[in-house]
Structures are given as structure tokens and as C-alpha cells.
Amino acid sequence: MSEKKLYSYTALFNTPDEIIHAVEKVSEKGYKNYDVNTPYPVHGMDGAMKLPPSKLGYIALVLGLSGMMAGLLMTYWMSAIDYPINIGGKPIFSFPAYIPIIFEITVLFAAVGTVLAMLLFFFKLPNNSHPLHGTNYMKAVSSDKFGISIQVDDKLFVKEEVINLFKELGSTEINPVYYDEVEINYKNKIFEPKFIMFLVVAFILTSGATYVTLNKLMFMVPFDWMSNQEKVIPQSKSMFYSDGFGMRTPVEGTIARGHIPYPYKGDLEAASAMPNPLLPTKENMKLGQQKYDTFCSLCHGYHGEGDSRLRGQFPNPPSLHSEKVRNWSDGSIYHVIMEGQNIMPAYSSQLTNDEKWAVILHLRALQRSLNAKETDLQ
Amino acid sequence: MSSSLTNFGYQQKELPVKVRNIGLALLLIGLVLAVIGYFVEPVRSMFNNIILLTFIISIGLGSLFFVALEYVTGAIWSVPFRRVMEFLAATLLIVPIIALPLLFNLHDIFHWTHPEVMKTDKLLAGKAPYLNEEFFIVRFLVFAALWILFYYAITLTSKKQDSTKETKLTRRNIKISAVFIPVFALTVSFTAIDWLMTLEPHWFSTIYGVYYFSGTVLAALAAGTYAIVSLNEKGYLLKGLDKDHYYSLGALLFAFVNFWAYIAFSQFLLIWYANLPEETIWFLQRWDGSWKYISILLMIVQFLVPYFGLLSQPSKKDGKKLKFFAVWILAAHYIDLYWLAMPTFSKEGFVLGWIELAYPILAVGIVVLVFSLKSKKSNFVAIGDPKLKRGIEFKL
């Protein structure tokens, strides 16, 4: 059996006012290594003990700010880098939408982190033995008494003086507390292998149990009914047809809805007789400009002057303001859009019929802007 | 027992005459400028008058709410300076006077007061049962009457207790307060809707009342904090009011700064997300031209600066800092109301001239004068309150 050592002298009081008064006196006398134990937090104790403001606030601040950065980076990375998806026409990274998320993560980091920091650094948690544990003193202060304990390792500790002080303060019970050195470990044991092993085992057990519950015991097949339909999908094989192809070519002579076959293939002469079915209304002009800017302007320039934006990657086309094109009928231009001309590719499938005619309206307007008719000037 | 012992050593002290004179001077300067303003630019003046009205309601009604809250929750820490909030609540008494010029000029301010518009505009026609002059005026008069009624009911009971020291008066005030709080909730919402939201009668936001409420409580708390800290420093209140009381006031201010930002952002987020033209127009107006700077200023002034200023524990215990941020927040609330009301008057960009400066001067004058008149020959401390002793000894 090892020798019991003196840890501290304790005194018990009956009311919170008495303990506050006692603590004020004790801290006035200059004692440093003492502690107060009460059944519930007594208001004003910090002041009486002359404790400096807790450092926990700074930990919370740092953790909160890290949470904020983490939230910002997470939302940014997810929505702008990893999986950019257009939601309701909003910008890819829409900050207002992420403020609630960033806020929640800030709070989460700060709250959980602060509690953990408190347990680990302030309560030195894995260390679960303290000389005061299991004493009558502890029993009393965890029910209805208010206690103070001045430790032997305080510089000013003199047994008789401490006892006298307690008596003066009117304590009902003054007792020494002894402890067994082997039982106490003052060191912070977070990094002790045993504790780390405990954390690892706890981690494996909880994550394993979660995995098994969610993926095995409670597993439900994801709803994929919509993608598993009995239908032929592109490129798939079909046993129904003798040639085994799932995709079929349309029956000869089939005409797609809304598609009118072009009768003047390779015949500019005949095409030139086609009239423009569209009137130069505001909407048509607007449509024409929009489509021209999208499909034609990159080679012909926004104003049809042949100032290509392709920087020589493709031969510059001639100006559309030439005598020749000005005198062409709308039908002829339509023919060029349909079939292309020399190195200009055809735009038959990119533009609908109406859009082609609208582009021609716009082209005419461009031409008139440089070569106005006499009547335009009136 | 000598009377000074039963009264916790409280010695009644009058505010120096200087305070009242300053209040009177500011009020007169503001009033003269406002009257001249009315003849130069009547419509603009009336919009400023709305800001003044809602600002004074904020301080008066918010203070009364604070008093009622103390009674209902049985709060202890605020008892030693509850009387200061009661004095501030007296500003409610002159609310009808401030509203008077507005009631005669409704046509210049509110689009919906024109019957021909209400008939032809389909959307407004649907709101006609609520939005009509008669009902509007009746609503306002009823609200003002209720406020003044509750103001007298609560403060007179509280004052009576100074001499009788009866506990039953506290109990009576708890009951009155419990009735007042729902009345407060409804009247503050409808006041916000009536005087501010209907400036744009087509637009609506269901959180608008709460938005104004958050500003109301914030402004009242700020005015109260400034008065309480100043009075305490000059020895008008009981000895023993200290860091713990300051901290609680500061924490409440800080909480309501956050609450305001939370509500303001909630209103913005939903409207921004849904992106419906009939709702976004209100924010777009406030993002148009130079209004953008006021919108940005508001976020900084009413949230970011006081947030970081009051974040740390020591700053909430520092009387000087508390006073600074109290004034700051009052100014922020004024800007907030300006931001709510003024864009309807000048759509192109914000206006800032001598008229806009006259009204805040008038507002400060009103509050200071009412406070000093109300506190005359009265105790600054509710010396008969049974919770007073515990209130002074309050520790965090």
C-alpha cells in the first residue's frame, strides 16, 4: 500500500452568499491554487475568484471563422467547380443562396468545436481521476453545500492559517483531503496510446454500425424505375429486327413535321424567284438580328462588311454590301443560306425557315444603312 | 428606519435645466426648418415626416414593449433602470401630433388614396376594403389610443408603487403587460404596413411587420442604453449598477443587431430566390442609381459595424463603447427608415438636403425634451419595486 498524501483543506458553507464572501476573502489573501465547488453555477463567482476572462471565446471565434471559410469553399467548389448547374437562371455561384449554408456551418464548427475544446483542454477530459472525487466533501457540494478547497501546493499554504481562515469565515465543516499518488495522473492524456486506441475503436465501431444499418439492414433499392424501361434506347441492340439494329432509318419519303423539302437544290436561278413571306415587323427584325449575330456575324461581321472575327482562321468573306448582293433577290440569298456557296457552309439545319427569312430582312436593313434609297431620306 | 434606507439610499435628483434647454432648442430648430420645408417642398417634407413618425413610434413603442417584457418574464436585472424606459415610452404621447400633418396630406403620399386609381387598377381594387382613407385613419387613431392607454396603465401603476410599495401593483402590471404584448405585436405590424409598405401599394412582403419590429426594439434598446449608461455615470441611478447590467444591455443590443440582419436577409433571400417581378421590383428600386449606395451603407452601418463592435465581452461591459454604439444604432435605424420610405419619393436616386437634416434634429429634440419633462419631479428608479434589491445585486 502506498502512502496517502495531503491534497488540500476544504471548507463547507451553507449559502451562496457565504461562499461568495469566503471566496472574496480567500482571493484577497493571495491564494492562487484553490477551487470552488457548488451544486449549481453561482452568479458572480468569476468576479469573486478574480478569474481572468475565459479564453474559450477566442477558440469559438477562430473555429467560427474556419467554419465560415469551410462553408464558403464548400459551396463554391460544389456549385462553381465540381458540378456547375444552372438553377433558375441564377449565376453559377450565387452567394445569397449559400449564406444560410455558410451560416449553419459557421455555427456548427463554432458550437461543436467549442464544446470539444472545453472538454479536452479545459476539463482535460480523458483524465478522469481527481483527488476530490469520491470524498465526502464532493458528496456534500453536489447536493446542497457550497465548498472551497485550498491546495497544499499553493505558495501561501500553511495548515493552521488556512484552518483559522475557514473558521473565521464561519465554515460549518473543515476537512483535509488525502489522495493516493498512483491513482492520480495530472497529465493531459489525449495523446496517450490507450486513449487514441479507444477513439479509433469507437470510430470504427460507430462508422461500421452506421454502414451496416444504412446499407444492409435498411437498404432500399434506389428509385430507378424511370431509367429501366422496356424501350429501345439509342445504340442498343434489338432482337426484334433481323439485322439486329435497334435504331431504324425512316421509311423512304418520310417528311419530318414542320419540314418542307427544298425544291431548288443546286438551282440558284429558280430559287431567286422565291418571295420573302415575312413582313419587316418589329419582332421579325429583332429575330433576324439575333440570328444574324449568332450565325452569320462571326464571318461577315456585325454589319456585313466582311470583317470576320475569326482572325484569319477562315478566309474573310466578301462584303454583303456589294452591288451584286444588293441587287440579288431575297430568294437568291435564301438559296445561299440553304446550300452555302463555295467555302461558306450551308445553314439549312441551324435555322428554321422563318428564321432564315428574318435574317434576310436584317441583312437588307444593314444594306440600306450604307446605301439608303432616295425615299429613306425624305 | 430612515427613508433613505428603505429606498436603498436613493436620492431624487433633477436633470440639469441645460438638458431640457438643449432638447427645446433642437426641437425648435428642427420645427422651424420643417415648417419652412413644408412650404418649399411639401411632398418631400411629408415623406420625411413619415420617417420621423415611424422613428418616434419605434422609440416609444419599443420602450413600452421592453417594460412589458420585464413584467411578463419576471426579469430582475432590468428593474433598477426600468423607469428610464418608462420615460422614453412617453414619446408615444406625441405620436398623434406628429401624424397630424400627414393625415392632412395623405393624397400627396399614398397612391391608393386616389379613388380613380383604385377603380381602374385591378390589383388595387382588390385591396380597396383595406386601403381606403377612412379605415386608414380609424386604424391609426385606434392604435394611438391603445398605445397611450397602455402607456398610462403601466407607468401610472409603476409610479404608484414608488410610494405604496405594494407587491400587488407588480402583479397588476404583469396582467396589463400580458394583454399589451399581443396588442403590441399586431399594432406594430399594421403600423409598418400602413405607413411604410403601402407607399408601394402593389408590392407586399409578409415579413415586413417583423422587419419593422426588429428595428423598433433595436432603436428603443439603443435609446434606453444611452440614457441608462449616461444617467448611471452621472449618479442618477442607484449605486451598484455595474458591468453585469451593462453586459446584459449590450448583449441584448447585440442580439437585436443580429435579429435585424437575420430578418432583413430573410426578406431579401426569399424574394431574390423566387425572382418574381412583382416582388423584386422593391429591391431593384433600392438598387437603382445612387440608392445602391444607401443599401450597401445600411448593411455596413446597421449590421457589420455594430456586430464587430459589440462582439467581444469587454466591449459590452464598457460604458463608453455602449454609448457610442447606442447612438450609432439609432442613426442606423433612422437610415433604415429613410431607406424604406424615401425611394418612393425619389426613384432616380437618393436625396439629401437640409430638409432631410431638419427631421432628425427634430426627432432628437422631441426625445430629449419629452424625456426631461417626464423625468421632472419623478424618481429615476422604481424604488417601490419588490425586485429592486435583487436587481441591483444582479450578477452574471
Image: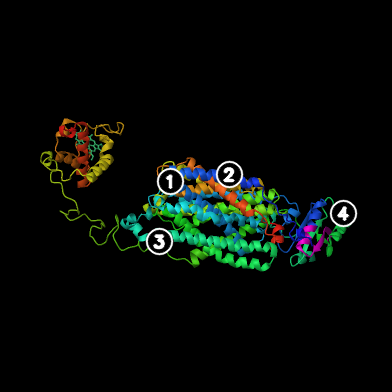
Q: Give, as a single range, the part of the protein colored magenta.
A: A1-21
Question: Could you confirm whether marks 2 and 1 are on the same chain?
Answer: yes
Q: Does A269 sit above or below residue B95?
A: above
Give the quarter of the image for residue A229.
bottom left
Question: Which residue is at a point 37% across and 52% down the rendered structure image?
Answer: B277
The chain ID associated with circle 2 is B
Q: Are marks 3 and 4 in contact (CB under 8 Å)?
A: no
Left or right: A41 in relation to A180: left
User: Mark 1 = which residue?
Assistant: B42
* Residue A158 marker: 4
Q: Secondary structure at mark 3?
A: loop
Position of the N terminus of chain B, as image quadrant, is: bottom right
User: Which amino acid lies under the numbered mark 2 shown in the image of this protein?
Assistant: Ala
The chain ID associated with circle 1 is B
Q: Secondary structure at mark 1?
A: helix
Q: CA distance from mark 3 to mark 4?
A: 81 Å
Residue B63 x/y as whole percent? 58, 56
User: Mark 2 = which residue?
Assistant: B25
Question: Could you confirm whether marks 2 and 4 are on the same chain?
Answer: no
User: Which amino acid lies under the numbered mark 1 shown in the image of this protein?
Assistant: Pro
